[in-house]
Amino acid sequence: MNKPPPSYYLCLAIIATSLLTILYASLKQAVWIPTFHMDGAYQTASGLFRLQSGQMPGRDFFPYLGIGPVFAVFPAFLAFGGDLAAAIMAAKFTTMSLGWFAASVIWKLFFSAQGKIQCLVGGVVALTLVMTLDKSIAWFYDAAFLMEPGNSLRPIRSIAPYCMVVLMFVLCRSMLRPILRDCLAGLCIGVLILWSNDFAIPTVFTFGSFYALFILLRPGQANRLISLSRFATVVILSAALILTLATAGYPLKILAFNFRDVAPDQWWYFGTYREVSRIFEPGDILKLFSIYHWERFGLSLGVLACVFVLAMATKKFEHLLLLGLGTAMFLGGLLPSVGGFLSNYFKAFNSWAALTFMVALLKGVIWAFKHLQKRQPAVSLPTQTATLVLLSMFLLTEAYKEFSEYRDLLTEARTTPGAFRDPVLGGYLTKDWKTYVNYARAHSDQIAIEEYWSIWSALNGQFADWPVDAAIHALGRVRQNAVSALDKADVIITTHYNLSPGWQPWSVSQNYWLYQILFRNWYVALESPLTVVWRRLPQPRAFEPTSCVISPDGRSFTLPEADVGLYHLQLNYDVSGTGRRLAFIENNISYGPGSYGYVSVPPDGGAVSLPVRIPLDGRGRALQTRTLGGLDVAITLTTCDAARIPFADESVIRHDFALGPWQRAR
């Protein structure tokens, strides 16, 4: 047996060192338990804890992040210990590992002759170069997207197209019999139904079309129509089977949540509500170029165009796959932009483009070096070995840096006065959380519901009697189920105003189905630094009726007798006009991005309950309506009932908060 060359062992050392870097980067994330609960770590942890307790998606809960991403993180979660710290570490570890995998896939498409070990090293090289340049070149900044779980595991959600590239690469180049290849390709496409909607749908469309074209254009392919029919049938049957198994027999339930409850509601429910951030008609797609930095999104489109030209010119299988990958990444950003609002949804596309550019550049450098040398191999063995040695030394330095930071964080946590490590959570908290943690543990036998699944639930292993991890995900019919569940609760935990003076008032407004029950039937029993604990009142608060006068044109209303304070409104309204639109009613509370003191309400009209704040200066008794989008759209108020809410607690609602420049209307 031939002995492997030194470069082989250097490649293994690079891979091992990279894994150590990822490990320590993950460990240091959970030394201090994160306490910002509105999105992010707890959103992920909720799904992982539910799986650990034996719950199944669809049957018991709806993972807003998608079934696939939660299952992808679950093995690392168990390996790290299955507590809250483990959930944080697992999300980071899985994200970084899959980001490395994504870079390695792109490397393989350019260097198809190289083996798995070499491609993994190539992925390290590409990522290292791109992330080194991200400090000086804005376009490369989004490549770091692949290294951070973010608020909603979007990097993991975006990995589906990369997985499909690998599967297509193997299947389409295999010597399998056509019937077996068609069935395996259909099975692979069908499995993607488990992934998140934003990337599952584009990936199924892109690579389903790719394989169909492969059948139609492959030389020597017999019975093309039969092969296509077989492939399509397996896609449908395998999708139904996989989804049924993953949901323990409740596939229709989770499909109904995704497409009947979430899809219609999230359009009007979530901010930002700025006109420049919304697509109301096909021509508004051009807004993509105004809201994104041209040097990032524009250059990424340029890379996609270049890959298209390359694929059409060479007809090389790897280049066609690279084109399919870029197309799926672009569509994965476009789908939530059209379905919601224009935000950072194209980071996955930008990261693909940056990595593709970097690997293509390295390919060009190697080609140029080869032709300058006028001999084979392109890179001599000593040069190759020296390069690998330098890379391994650099990565060893990075691994030691991550280890040192992890060690320093541990030392800081152990020596910070009053800081404590909770054995259930698996990490450290500052002393100002001690009272809250002790209170939660002392009341672990009581039914608790959190506005956002967070520390209380993680400590006690509890889940609200609703199938989502936060009030913001109780959309459609789930909202009514959530309201019913509140009747059984002993404790309700909501977000403290101090956590986010922009988003907490937005939540009070948009989730008034929750807060109106709290204002009437509950009182604030305890505050933590970032949460509020509510307990049930012996007797409900009596809301004090006051007059509400609608203007003659029905476009505004007035509370003529209202004094400074908080008010409950019950409105009925109609919305006229055509086209996609948003409808708003002023309440002087909601100041999330684009809100400007208005609540977004269902854009087709109906009945709605809202909180209204009369500020300290007395202004705001006259309140307006407004709309965005559509053609000749207008709100007409038909009935209005108002009542004063005798509640004042600055941990929940402020009457004197000052508006920042981003909150003021433009």
Image: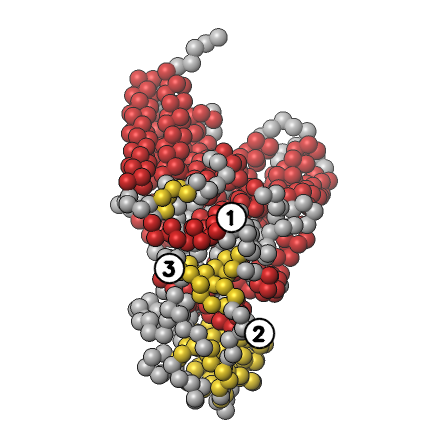
The tag earlier along the polypeptide, 3 or 2, is 3
> Is residue 222 at least partly visible in the picture?
yes
Q: Which residue is mark 3?
A: 499
Say if 314 sits above or below 336 in the image. above
State left or right for residue 380 relative to residue 538. Answer: left
Using a 10 Å C-alpha cutoff, classify the residue at mark 1 as few (fewer than 14 neighbours), some (14 to 19) or many (20 or more). some
Q: Is residue 238 above or below residue 632?
A: above
- Colour mapping: secondary structure
Does residue 657 sit above or below 500 in this rendering?
below
Looking at numbered disc 1 in the image, what kind of residue is underneath it? Asn
Q: Is residue 124 visible?
A: no
- The kind of secondary structure element at disc 3 is helix
Q: Nearer the viewer, residue 454 or 347?
A: 454
Q: Residues within 10 Å of mark 2 (few under 14, many from 20)?
A: some
Q: Secondary structure at mark 1?
A: helix
Residue type pointed to by label 2: Asp
**Quarter of the figure that contains the C terminus:** bottom left
- Residue under label 2, please give it: 604
Locate residue 382 relative to residue 27 in the image: left or right: left
Residue occupying the far top of the picture: 1
Q: Quick one: label 3, few (<14), some, or many (20+) residues within 10 Å?
A: some
Residue projecting furthest to the bottom:
552
